[in-house]
Image: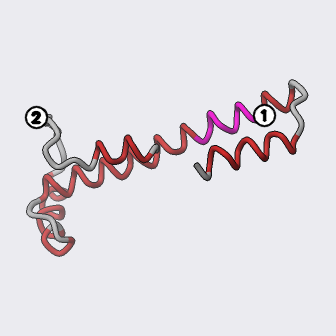
């Protein structure tokens, strides 16, 4: 995920919407029990943290898949490996 997007997501006063989610009662009980020991004020912030982490992981995988597909396509079109390595280094270390 890009740094700019991540910074926006870490803004504490982002707009929120209510979502209804059905979960097994024992899972909610476990969340309530573990939340304070992980430093959360309740189980709902813990759920948001879990969802956020999973979402960031999946977004990163998708971005990486797209990047790998682009590199593979450029190779098929005859772009030199050295040029690809230099271009990737520029993007990664910006």
Which stretch appears magenta?
64-72
Residue matched to label 2 = 18
In this rendered view, identify the residue nearer to me: 78 or 68. 78
Majority secondary structure of magenta residues: helix
Specify the quadrant of the image occupied by residue 66.
top right
Q: Residue 72 location in percent, x, y?
A: 78, 34
Q: Is residue 35 above or below residue 12?
A: below
Give the label on residue 43, or none: none
Q: Is residue 66 above or below residue 64?
A: above
| Left or right: residue 1 compared with residue 24 | right
Specify the quadrant of the image occupied by residue 70.
top right
Q: Residue 71 location in percent, x, y?
A: 75, 35
Looking at the image, which residue is at 80% across and 29% down?
A: 74
In this rendered view, identify the residue nearer to me: 80 or 54. 80
Q: How many numbered marks appear?
A: 2
Residue matched to label 1 = 72
Question: Marks 1 and 2, Cα distance to the nearest angstrom?
Answer: 42 Å
Looking at the image, which residue is at 20% across and 58% down?
A: 46
Q: Secondary structure at mark 1?
A: helix
Q: Residue 35 location in percent, x, y?
A: 16, 66
Q: Colour scheme of this structure image? A: secondary structure
Residue at the extreme bottom of the image, as rendered: 37
Looking at the image, which residue is at 70% across and 44% down?
A: 88
In this rendered view, identify the residue nearer to me: 8 or 31. 8
Looking at the image, do the residues carrying marks 1 and 2 touch, with CB atoms under 8 Å apart?
no
Q: Residue 92 location in percent, x, y?
A: 62, 49
Looking at the image, which residue is at 62% across and 38% down?
A: 65
Asked if residue 12 is among those painted magenta in the image, a careful observer would answer no
Q: Is residue 67 above or below residue 24?
A: above
Q: Residues within 10 Å of mark 2 (few under 14, many from 20)?
A: few
Q: Secondary structure at mark 2?
A: loop
Asked if residue 71 is among those painted magenta in the image, a careful observer would answer yes
């Amino acid at each position: 995920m890009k740094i700019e997007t991540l910074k926006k997501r870490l803004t504490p006063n982002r707009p929120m919407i209510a979502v209804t989610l059905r979960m097994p009662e024992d899972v909610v009980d476990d969340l309530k029990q573990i939340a304070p020991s992980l430093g959360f004020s309740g189980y709902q912030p813990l759920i948001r943290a879990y969802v956020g982490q999973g979402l960031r992981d999946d977004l990163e995988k998708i971005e990486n898949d797209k990047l790998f597909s682009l590199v593979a396509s450029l190779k098929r079109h005859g772009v030199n490996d050295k040029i690809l390595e230099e271009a990737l280094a520029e993007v990664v270390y910006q």
